[in-house]
């Protein structure tokens, strides 16, 4: 009701109206403005804490006849959504049944909707005049204020309007209501046509709108690839079905035809995808009867490139086995079956032939002939065989190269481990050297002690004292020799470990060098094979100048034929020699 009244009053189409959203902590506001003058035409205001919603149309009125079932002011206006004369009453009944207070302020009256006192299934409307002092206070109202005049505007209030034990409107419920009207949150990825709007955004898939209002679609979930907003179609009184299903299919076909003629090629590709998909997209339902000739021609032109690139031949579901055999045996193409929703329009406009028709029209009087294999054909066959062998060798080299790379990575890991072991051995060697140094210091100390003992021996006077001194000296000498032996053994072991670490490091470096050389040889071999393959491909292209020269020499002297045969034999031998070289 709000949107239709604004469109009717301003004369601006719904897709041109400007909607501005403002989401604050305690309220959510949508204001509707004229696209050129920016004049405010109405507003929507939701109070989050109170759970109350206001909808206002400036410069509108609501006559008493609006309470009668079937009365509508928009029956003759095709641009407006409502025409059955039941929308206001049904909306008020639903709000009251859900427990929300419902009040309209318009034409100087308060319209309060409630359930019947004795019959809860009935809807009653109580009208009371707005006091004169309130009517007078609105005469100086600014159009930029979010406020309505009881006499010149229409204000709808829902939720906690008068207080008391009522059900307030929750914020999630309100946000879901906003999704009912398409233009509150207009899609960005869409195409507008004279029949309606095609919406490509994923969140709008399966959704159908009629003049901006969400329709309770009867299509199964996931059956529509896109969303649609229809202009000329009319829904039933309950908005649960289209009055004419055939009209819906025809309108869909016209909508896509208009988009294909005016938009980039990706639109056509998407349409072909839906036509040829195994999914039964309802976007193309009934298209076999409704596809226009320009659309069919555009589809066929687009498929021509696919036919050329992949050497395809399309055939229909009827006589599929017969057509498949004909394509494989006589046409030597790759068969691909086309569904009826695209095959039938192509046949209808005589754009495609069956395999039998194509074979008959291509050569009506042709007879089978046996063509002798020429020298050039033999060369081509040999070249093809050589190319296949080269491709196999290249694949082998690439596999070997991948193996070498993996080995190289493994050797890098092993090298790092050897490097860590070497560092460990180096630390042990340093520790042994430090121990050796300490042992040498101890040996020097023992020598000093020995010298002192020798002097004591010469100075001692009695034999008993001399014997005891000699025994101590001998014990010290033995201990010193043992320490020296242990130090030498430790030093020798350290040298052996260092030598082993050096040998392992040298072997690892040699393995890395060998792997790099193998990789380089593999790359050189692959490059050589690619060059040989290019020479063979160049050989397959016969030179027009050489053919002309050969014909000239054949006409001038009889010995030219013999020379030409010898030249061909040499060429064949050269090709075979190169093949042997490559294969070796």
Image (spheres, rainbow, N blue to C red):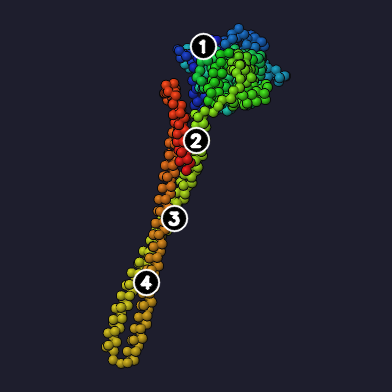
Pointer 4 or 3: first along the chain: 3
Pointer 2 or 4: first along the chain: 2
Q: Is residue 251 above or below residue 327?
A: above
Label 3 or label 1, whichever lies nearer to me, is: 3
Whole-number angstrom distance, CA of label 4 to CA of label 1: 107 Å
Residue hosting label 3: 417
Residue hosting label 2: 387
Q: Residue 6's spot in the image, x, y percent? A: 54, 13
Q: Nearer the viewer, residue 495 or 73?
A: 495
Dot 4: element: helix
Dot 2: element: helix
Residue depicted at x 55% and y 21%: 303
* Label 2 neighbour load within 10 Å: few <14, some 14-19, many 20+: many
- Image quarter where the N terminus lies is top right
Task: Tell me which corner region of the image, top left, top right, bottom left or bottom right, holds residue 466.
Answer: bottom left
Residue 488 marker: 4
Residue depicted at x 62% and y 8%: 75
Residue hosting label 1: 12
* Label 1 neighbour load within 10 Å: few <14, some 14-19, many 20+: few
């Amino acid at each position: 009701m709000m949107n239709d009244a604004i469109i009717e009053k301003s004369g601006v189409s719904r897709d041109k109206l400007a909607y501005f959203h403002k989401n604050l902590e305690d309220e959510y506001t949508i204001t509707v403005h004229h696209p050129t003058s920016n004049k405010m035409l109405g507003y929507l205001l939701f109070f989050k804490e109170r759970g109350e919603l206001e909808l206002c149309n400036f410069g509108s009125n609501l006559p008493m006849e609006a309470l009668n079932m079937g009365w509508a002011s928009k029956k003759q206006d095709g641009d407006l959504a409502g025409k059955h004369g039941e929308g206001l009453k049904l909306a008020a009944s639903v709000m009251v049944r859900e427990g929300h207070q419902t009040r309209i302020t318009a034409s100087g009256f308060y319209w309060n909707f409630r359930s019947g006192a004795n019959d809860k299934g009935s809807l009653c409307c109580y009208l009371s005049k707005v006091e004169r002092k309130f009517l007078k206070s609105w005469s100086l109202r600014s159009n930029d204020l979010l406020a309505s005049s009881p006499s010149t505007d229409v204000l709808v209030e829902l939720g906690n309007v008068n207080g008391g034990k009522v059900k307030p409107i929750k914020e999630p419920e309100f946000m879901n209501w906003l999704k009912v009207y398409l233009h509150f949150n207009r899609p960005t990825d869409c195409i507008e046509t004279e029949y309606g709007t095609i919406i490509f955004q994923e969140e709008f898939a399966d959704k159908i709108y009629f003049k901006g209002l969400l329709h309770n679609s009867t299509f199964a979930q996931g059956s529509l690839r896109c969303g649609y907003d229809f202009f000329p179609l009319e829904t039933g009184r309950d908005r649960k079905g289209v009055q004419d299903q055939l009209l819906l299919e025809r309108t869909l076909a016209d909508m896509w035809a208009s988009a294909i003629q005016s938009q980039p090629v990706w639109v056509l590709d998407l349409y072909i995808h839906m036509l040829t998909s195994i999914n039964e997209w309802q976007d193309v339902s009934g298209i076999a009867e409704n596809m226009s000739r320009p659309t069919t021609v555009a589809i066929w032109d687009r498929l021509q490139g696919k036919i050329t690139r992949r050497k395809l031949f399309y055939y229909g579901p009827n006589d599929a086995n017969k057509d498949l055999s004909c394509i494989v045996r006589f046409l030597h193409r790759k068969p691909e079956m086309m569904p009826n929703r695209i095959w039938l329009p192509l046949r209808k406009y005589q754009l495609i032939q069956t395999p039998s028709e194509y074979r008959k029209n291509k050569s009506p009087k042709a007879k089978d002939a046996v063509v002798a294999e020429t020298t050039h054909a033999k060369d081509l066959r040999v070249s093809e065989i050589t190319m296949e062998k080269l491709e196999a060798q290249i694949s082998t080299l690439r596999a070997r190269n991948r193996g070498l790379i993996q080995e190289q990575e493994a050797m890098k890991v092993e090298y790092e481990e050897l490097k860590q072991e070497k560092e460990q051995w180096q630390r042990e060697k340093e520790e042994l050297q430090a121990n050796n140094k300490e042992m040498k210091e101890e040996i020097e100390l023992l020598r000093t002690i020995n010298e002192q003992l020798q002097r004591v021996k010469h100075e001692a006077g009695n034999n008993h004292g001399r014997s005891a001194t000699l025994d101590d000296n001998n014990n010290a000498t033995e201990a010193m020799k043992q320490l020296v032996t242990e130090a030498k053994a430790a030093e020798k072991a350290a040298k052996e470990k260092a030598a082993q670490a050096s040998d392992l490091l040298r072997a690892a470096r040699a393995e890395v060098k060998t792997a790099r050389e193998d990789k380089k040889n593999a790359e050189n071999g692959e490059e050589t094979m690619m060059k040989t393959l290019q020479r063979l491909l160049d050989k397959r292209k016969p030179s027009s100048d050489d053919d002309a020269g050969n014909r000239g020499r054949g006409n001038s002297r009889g010995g030219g034929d013999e020379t030409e045969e010898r030249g061909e034999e040499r060429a064949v031998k050269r090709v075979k020699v190169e093949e042997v070289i490559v294969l070796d």
